[in-house]
Image (cartoon, rainbow, N blue to C red):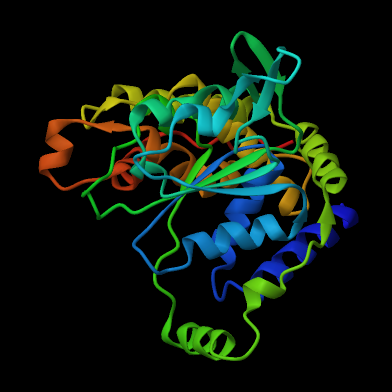
């Protein structure tokens, strides 16, 4: 546990040099990293979405690529393609997704056909081109950003794509004190993001990911997660509730959160802490809920009190 704490502390401290006052958001990203999940960072322009994602990537001694999604990006730009070489043999040219940490910037600005190129790679950690499968090097993580308010030239992510993201997080505006600090740091001769250096290796992350798998989840907590997801499928406020993949994601994220908190077992508070980030973006709201101006978080707030919390702990 001490090794876990030292690695996570180093990562949080390194990220905080560039990202001010967003400790909870950083913790969510580290939770996703520890359970091999992908993150959708959704917020208005100018609050630090790209800065946060790129700083986390630079803090890891892993290969990193940024993909700026535009309408003219094609699936082969993402997955790669085969081309004849001088000997007449077909040779694979890797696409931009062939990296350990990938920043998919403004993912909703590319076409649905290109978005679908990410489905296999995000779920299976592999790319198939012309019938040949190419595995990706681990750890592998996609951090995507999108702007929720600008609808000009955007393509909403389909449900299948949203379900591939372990979490959706929102950064929000900084407090006035934090904004003053941001102005101080970024108005000097040295830009913090340009000074970011790796503080842990790929091997460190793989070791932590293996430890997450051994965090204990009792039968009672598993039943609590299933009951919570089942409740989202019964409410009239949703036409599509949480899937089985969502239940697995919530369990795995809770394991990572427990490890970050220094425990080797999950408690119901882990599930409650993460359920909005893990579940709400997977919902499809009913017409009734949309007319009432509700969102996934608000619906979960109504559902949570109706699900019995287990009292037995390991």
The answer to which image quadrant residue 191 occupies is bottom right
Residue 159 percent coordinates (x, y): 36, 27
Q: Nearer the viewer, residue 132 or 238?
A: 132
Number of dots carrying numbers: 0
Q: Quadrant of the C terminus?
A: top right
Q: Is residue 2 left or right of residue 122?
A: right
Question: Can residue 86 be seen here?
Answer: yes
Q: Nearer the viewer, residue 121 or 274?
A: 121
Q: Residue at x 42, y 30 (%)?
A: 114
Indicate whether 47 appears above or below 96.
below
Q: Residue at x 57, y 28 (%)?
A: 79
Q: Nearer the viewer, residue 222 or 96?
A: 96
Indicate whether 219 appears above or below 303.
above
Residue 284 percent coordinates (x, y): 28, 31
Residue 68 percent coordinates (x, y): 47, 49
Q: Residue at x 34, y 40 (%)?
A: 71
Question: Can residue 246 be seen here?
Answer: no
Q: Is residue 177 left or right of residue 61?
A: left
The answer to which image quadrant residue 54 occupies is bottom right
Indicate whether 23 appears above or below 253.
below
Q: Nearer the viewer, residue 46 or 63?
A: 63
Residue 48 percent coordinates (x, y): 48, 67
Q: Residue at x 43, y 57 (%)?
A: 170
Q: Is residue 271 left or right of residue 107?
A: right
Residue extending farthest front: 86
Indicate whether 182 appears above or below 285.
below
């Amino acid at each position: 546990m001490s090794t876990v704490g030292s690695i996570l502390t180093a990562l949080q401290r390194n990220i905080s040099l560039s990202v001010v006052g967003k400790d909870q958001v950083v913790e969510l990203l580290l939770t996703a990293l520890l359970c091999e999940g992908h993150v959708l960072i959704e917020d208005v322009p100018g609050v630090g979405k790209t800065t946060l994602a790129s700083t986390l990537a630079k803090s890891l001694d892993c290969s990193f690529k940024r993909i700026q999604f535009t309408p003219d990006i094609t699936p082969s730009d993402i997955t790669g393609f085969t081309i004849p070489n001088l000997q007449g043999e077909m040779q694979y040219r890797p696409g931009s997704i062939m990296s350990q940490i990938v920043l998919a910037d403004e993912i909703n600005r590319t076409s649905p056909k290109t978005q679908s190129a990410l489905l296999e790679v995000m779920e299976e950690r592999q790319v198939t081109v012309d019938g040949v499968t190419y595995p990706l090097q681990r750890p592998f993580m996609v951090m995507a950003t999108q702007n929720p308010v600008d609808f000009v030239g955007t393509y909403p992510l389909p449900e299948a794509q949203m379900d591939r993201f372990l979490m959706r997080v929102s950064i929000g505006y900084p407090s006035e004190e934090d904004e003053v600090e941001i102005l101080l740091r970024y108005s000097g001769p040295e830009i913090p993001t340009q000074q970011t250096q790796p503080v842990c290796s790929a091997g460190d992350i793989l070791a932590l990911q293996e430890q997450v798998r051994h965090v204990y989840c009792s039968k009672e907590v598993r039943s609590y997660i299933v009951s919570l997801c089942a409740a989202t499928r019964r409410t009239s406020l949703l036409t599509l509730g949480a899937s089985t993949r969502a239940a697995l994601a919530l369990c795995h994220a809770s394991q990572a959160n427990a490890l970050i908190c220094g425990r080797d077992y999950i408690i119901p508070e882990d599930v409650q802490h993460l359920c909005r980030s893990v579940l709400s973006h997977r919902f499809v709201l009913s017409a009734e809920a949309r007319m009432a101006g509700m969102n996934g978080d608000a619906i979960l707030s109504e559902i949570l009190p109706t699900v019995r919390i287990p009292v037995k702990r390991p």
